[in-house]
Amino acid sequence: MSSPEKKRKTTKKPSPTPQSTTPNPSLPDDLVVSCLARVSRLYYPTLSLVSKSFRSLIASPDLYKTRSLLGRTESCLYVCLQEKDSDPNPRWFTLCLKPNRTLTNDITEKKKKKKKKKMSSGYVLAAIPVLHSRPAYWSGLVAVGSNIYNIGGPIDKAHSSIVSVLDCQSHTWHEGPGMRVERRYPAANVVEGKIYVTGGCKDCSNSSNWMEVFDPRTQTWESVSSPGAEIGGCSIHKSAVVEGEILIANSHGLIYKPKEGRWERMKWDMDIGWVWYSYCVVENVLYYYYKGVFKWYDTMARLWRDLKGVKGLPRFARCGGKMADYGGKMAVFWDKIVTSDDGCKNKMILCAVIALERRNSEEIWGKVEWHDAVLTVPLSYEVVYALSPTV
């Protein structure tokens, strides 16, 4: 009996795997986006250097939709530096963590580090490659959501109604609806998501021109009834928002209450101090810095009090640099002139982040979480604005 015929085994050639656009070809796009969405945005500038794919995903709308759905949005510090007030090309930076930052829980390692000089905090300012960024020195800048608005300011030395919007997700500029009135160095403030722009008018004789409001949801501007330049003045020295009220510091000192549509004079004790120095508002409290001391305004007692507990900061300019609300904490920027080995002088930008705690109605304490040099620039540059959009 003949042996049964052996069946020939046929093997199928595997079909070629389609190329993936994700940074890791073995992972689908949505999984990579889900992973990136859970990472703090402090690491995004570093991750964007990994590959073109990472850089593309980090700027994608899907990533930020996922971050929002997961509740992972966070305050991000953005800083604008400009070379004098005539620089047509300001430079933008965002706070991030250095890629070589290492952490250790080893006790002996910590003891060794104590003997060495102060360790770096790991924070630096990373340049944002934004194109066509117009001057910011004489503009009004505010952050609403994930956008930064550059409002008015001189264009070719003339008043302007132009509004430019920086999308802090994709780091691209686009033009927003122009103001009703041309302005130069206006005051810009945000109340409940709306942008109130005051002063700096080309024509101050008409009181209806003095203040206008922009609603980002409807993309429309409206005039705001106001006392006008006769009382308010064309130039606004400083302005801030505390408890939903806009404080406008000029020769008279005015307060506007948007909910009531009502104006009133600023109390004399409020209209001093913060007008001339570096200041910011954090969780409805107005702070300013002068000669090594941070002060805050007690709206109930109507007086300025010292911020207690701030230790470990080096001495810097008596009027400070720039201050900003950083997600409920206070960020402070100042500079220091340094000389390199070849004798060239540069400017070192330093930053401190201070956590704030209200212990009772009369005491707010601050704790310096970290302070460090975050950037070195040519001597002619200065910090023009520091803002904290939510991304």
Image (cartoon, grey):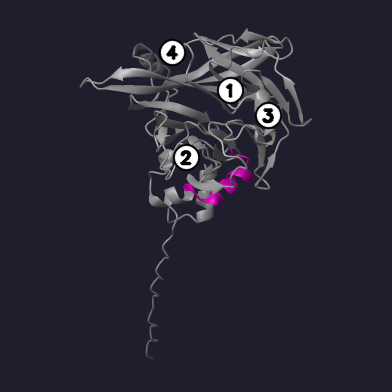
Q: Specify which label sits upstream in the sequence, 4 or 3.
A: 3
Please state which of the two labelled residues, at mark 2 or mark 4, is closer to the viewer.
2
* SS at badge 2: loop
| Residue at image point 70% right, 17% down | 266
Please state which of the two labelled residues, at mark 1 or mark 4, is closer to the viewer.
1
On residue 238, the disc is: 1
Question: Measured along the vertical axis of the image, is residue 201 above or below residue 284?
Answer: below
On residue 228, the disc is: 3
Q: Disc 4 marks which amino acid?
A: Phe
| Residue at image point 57% right, 34% down | 142
> Could you tell me if residue 194 is visible in this image?
no
Marks 2 and 4: CB-CB under 8 Å?
no
Query: In terms of depth relative to the viewer, which is nearer, 61 or 176?
Result: 176
User: Which residue, given by chain and number where applicable, does mark 4 sit on?
Assistant: 316
Q: Residues within 10 Å of mark 2 (few under 14, many from 20)?
A: some
Please state which of the two labelled residues, at mark 1 or mark 2, is closer to the viewer.
2
* SS at badge 4: loop
Query: In terms of depth relative to the viewer, which is nearer, 213 or 52?
Result: 213
Query: In terms of depth relative to the viewer, which is nearer, 142 or 368?
Result: 142
User: Which residue, given by chain and number where applicable, does mark 2 sit on?
Assistant: 155
Q: Residues within 10 Å of mark 1 (few under 14, many from 20)?
A: some
- How far apart marks 1 and 2 lie (CA) works out to 22 Å
Please state which of the two labelled residues, at mark 2 or mark 3, is closer to the viewer.
3
Q: Is residue 199 magenta?
A: no
Q: Is residue 66 magenta?
A: yes
Q: Disc 1 marks which amino acid?
A: Lys
- How far apart marks 2 and 4 lie (CA) works out to 34 Å
- How far apart marks 1 and 4 lie (CA) works out to 22 Å
Q: Disc 2 marks which amino acid?
A: Ile
